Image (cartoon, helix red, strand yellow):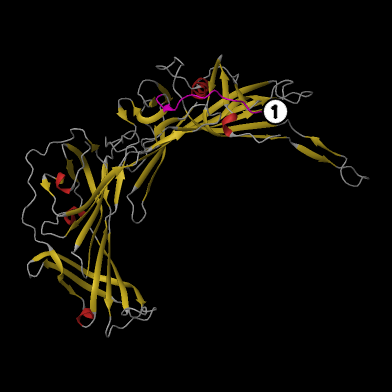
Amino acid sequence: MLSRIRREGQRLTVNGTGVNAIQSLSFGYQSTAQPITPLGLSQVVYAPSAPQTATINTNSLLVYDDFFINFTGEMPFSGQVDYKDQNVKFTEAYLSSYSSSCSIGEIPSIGMQADIFGELGTGSFFDFGATTPHDEELKIAGYNSIDISLDEFSSNRVNSYSLDIGVPRSPVYAFNDRTPSEVVSNSPLSVSLNFNIEPDDYKIKNMRFVPEETVFRNVRVRVNKNNSTEKIQDYLFNNLLLVSEQYSADNNGNVGIQMSLQGTILR
Amino acid sequence: MASIRYDKIPLILEYDGRTEKVLAYDCSLNEEATLQPAYSIGKQGIAEQTPAGARKASVSFSYTPVLTGYATVGNEFNIINEAARKQKILKGTQATEVAIRFGGISGEGLLESYSVSLEPYAPVTCNVNFLLLGSGENIPVSGELISQDQAHKQADLASDVGHTAYSDFMAGESPATITSDNQTGVLTSVNYSINFNYEPVYKLGQEFPSTFLYHSANERAEISENTFETGIAFTGKAENFDLEIKSLDNKTAMRIRMTRPIVKDSRLSISAGDIANTSKTLNSFY
């Protein structure tokens, strides 16, 4: 009888440590093998047209061991995905984007995407040895335990936030090598922080506010354990530039304003 | 005449008793006549347009080399590379031609330029230009464009094509990127080219050349790397540089030997958001 693999039959381990609270996981590759179709074509032959890479994406609940944000630096990570009695290993994964978001009625979540420049597959690329198991006790955040420090939000209701950090990488390949000689972590990292608010006295800026009334903001998003003040994650950004305000309303709802802040982090 | 699809127009080369079907991505043929209007006092308009030079043609194409069957280096088989190798070291002055057949059109051409490009982990791509001048009573190109059916084969891995996977560019025993103070960088791409100079010998009473004389060749390799040395050592390394292009299965190869090249120029550039790019050009003359 055909069986299936459910959530309890899978596990992601990164650098020897189990990753908690994963909601979705995907990884894979798109072969760079391309057909060569010459003049007088009589046979299609295939050859690699570029170095092979792969990607891995995860989305997880924000729990206290959110260690993916630590990989926005220069270090790569390795890992393995176990499912049933199979395992797939990957090496030299470099985080390319990190995101965090929450809206009313949701559990705060984080997402990450990484480019894999090393290996990905069922080979024996490494052996973690004994891995640290998944933690049994999770400190899960709740939408009611988020503290956002931004002046406008004292009198305007925040419905949601979403944070995206872009982490640029530049792989350097020798022309005759299938893996990069080095992966340069580029600078700056881009930060995009979006809020959706239901305004009370929120004042939309003049669209020509740059340069005379340029608005920079220091923002702190602190995510605590559900129904608690115990900190899980603290995002602190200085000098984010207000780049967008979108007012929207319809017959059956309250006025909403989407405001976007952008910034950079230098390495 | 019905339109003809690319797969019905094979590009075939013949040289030194050997025939090669080229893995060509494109091919263009240009033919031109040098005409001059003849004016005459007392006559309105022109008397006629009259030839002021020979008809000539050029054929250029890009391709990926296939490395099977020609036993010179390993199992080298690449007519253009072999023709270029022989031409540049030719002791005599008589240039040799390569026969080109292209969808029913044919002619004999002098290899005018040949370039090879190597990018990370990709098939090697070459560009070539032939000069077709005709000879004696033979016009530069003849025949007509016709469709040629090809016997189909099953798809397969391109095992025999030149690929950068196992290729090398070496100066003696070291990577060609090495600098005078022995820094070894990462060689990210190579663009090699060679140009030949010929002299067609014309005589009165005959449109096309009676013979072709070979004069010289200049060869260059532009390499991109991540090291930079200030100051150019005009003395070179007193070593030959070998560009060895191997097949995807690492079983066969073709080789281009640059004889004692000298660094002609070096460049360093950087733009915001990127890493520094450095490159240099090596030159050899024959």
Q: Secondary structure at mark 1?
A: loop
Residue extent of the magenta highlight: B142-159
Q: Nearer the viewer, residue B76 or A4?
A: A4
Q: Where is the N terminus of chain A found, in terms of image quarters?
A: top left
The residue drawn where x is 56% and y is 31% is B7
Going by the image, does A65 lie left or right of A242? left
> Is the residue marked by circle 1 packed among few (<14), some (14-19), or many (20+) residues within 10 Å?
few
In which quarter of the view is residue A209 placed? bottom left
Q: Residue furthest bottom?
A: A201
- Measured from the top left, where is residue B23 in percent x and y? 50, 28
Going by the image, does A142 lie left or right of B67? left
The residue drawn where x is 8% and y is 43% is A131
Q: Amino acid at mark 1?
A: Glu
Q: Residue furthest front?
A: A1
**Magenta-drawn stretch contains A253:** no
Can residue B193 be seen?
no
Q: Nearer the viewer, residue B128 or B266?
A: B128
Residue located beneath label 1 in the image:
B144
- Measured from the top left, where is residue B131 in percent x and y? 62, 29
Q: Where is the C terminus of chain A found, in terms of image quarters?
A: bottom left
